[in-house]
Image (cartoon, rainbow, N blue to C red):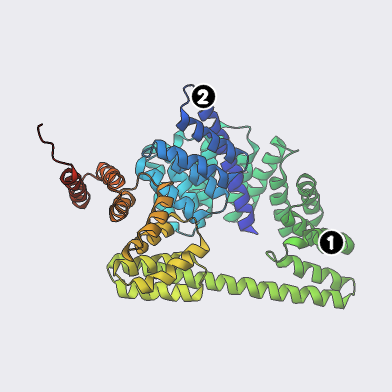
Amino acid sequence: MKSVRTNALILVFLLAIVEVLFAAAALQTNHGQAEDDLEEGIKLIAAGRYIESLAAFNRFKQSVPQDSGPYFYSAVALTQAGRLSAAALELQEAIRLAPGKPEYLVLQATVLSQLKQNENALAALAAAEKEGSAKELEPAWLKLLAETYLRLWKTDDALRVLALLSERSPKDASIDLDRGKVYVTIGQFDLAMEALKKSIEKAPSHNSGAYFELGKILYQSGEFEASETALLKAVEQDQNNPEYLSKLGAVALARGEVDEAIGHLQRAQTAATAFPEIYFALGRAYQRKGNRVRAGEYFNRFERATTAQRQSEEKNQLVDRNITRGELKLDEGNVTEARSFFEQAAVADPDRWEPHGYLAEMFLDSGELDRAYPHLTKMEAIDPDSVVGNYLMARYSFARKDFERARTYAERVEKSRPGNSELRGLLGRVYEALGKTQDALREYEIAVRLAPGRVDFQDALRRIRSQGTQRKPAVTKP
């Protein structure tokens, strides 16, 4: 149940962050169209219309392609929409354009930690805290920083950040709640209870999380009556939370209140596929009532759900392991072994985008177009909006001399990556192949401006300019 709780916390943090961003945007007085697009996108995020906001941010990118802001805001929207891989790509571009911004790095670390790229997440956090820059962050960012440290099991760092937050906002009950969670993680339950009770004292009416955490500790220590009291408060403040209801049912069962336990657990049952322990608790409750048939049904459901969950986890671990090994082999320059690991990952889970992405790019680089294509089509089926997927499909189509199709995919990428020199160079080649000389000239000029050290872009620009000169009609004197 930890993952659901973590995602909810991230959502709360990001919504608070969006409020900060929106307030900053509202302070702008001289609005052009680009600023209007930016403000519209932030409003859409605040309204929960995350995917819609991307179109507004993409329009801003077209107006100001070297501005890091729309990439960052796009990452916020994608994170809240659950599209973490896409969010990571947006953050990569934002940080390229504005290196060292602590807000960008904290969000990058949060996203990478959820993608289980823990070493990269820690590197981002180290960069965010370089020279004490993180201390200047807004409270919402500091909370996200502490939560990310906790997810990465850096509990000392989490407590350090929470101490800084507490100095700034001593009346904020959520800081004590977060501190209590850290103490629970490291097994210091007395300190955890102290922090949670302090949180409840500060905010007794809107603090379901603190009541829940306190109820769990009391349950573990065998104080069932006190635990039930705390958990009833949690459910009173968040009536449909399956995690709260499940724990309340377990406490009621421990106290011998079988009918009450069944009532709480049945309310939580809609989430039992994800949380099989609800099925198990219901089985125990009906067993206590002497209803062996119903008990057996729930125990069977528990067995099926846990088996499916275990198989899914094992598959994910296998795929993650092979992807990591493949990446290490790529870093070592061993392309053959890297390809083998990525192929194993793709076979283990055909619906994982990453191994197909690696394989498609590797086959394109080696000119093995027939082998690249199945991976490209699978990538498109999994995530048709992927910037990388569309770019690779544009490369493939160009190599196949299907220039119109290459143009379609490349122009799709250009909407969200106008400042990418590789893309602009590819678009130049596509337009040149289609006989669109002026469009090709424009793209090569942009590519050279974005990457002035690229000799191939300079050569292409000279070539297209010379072609234009040769086509000019001779001017003769009358």
Q: Residue 422's x, y, as percent?
A: 31, 52
Q: Which residue is mark 1?
A: 261
Left or right of 212 in this view: 345: left
Given residues 413 and 261, the one toward you in this image is: 413
Q: Residues within 10 Å of mark 2 (few under 14, many from 20)?
A: few
Instruction: Quote the CA–CA distance across marks 2 and 1.
Output: 52 Å
Mark 2 element type? loop
Given residues 357 and 385, the one toward you in this image is: 385
Q: Quadrant of residue 276?
A: bottom right
Q: Residue 387's x, y, as percent?
A: 43, 54
Q: Is residue 335 placed above or below 225 in the rendered structure?
A: below
Q: Amino acid at mark 2?
A: Leu
Q: Is residue 267 placed above or below 208 in the rendered structure?
A: below
Q: Residue 304's x, y, as percent?
A: 70, 75
Left or right of 341 in this view: 231: right
Left or right of 246 in this view: 66: left
Can residue 266 be seen in this snapshot?
A: yes
Q: Residue at x 35, y 59 (%)?
A: 403
Q: Amino acid at mark 1?
A: Ala
Q: Residue 33's x, y, as percent?
A: 47, 30
Q: Which residue is mark 2?
A: 27
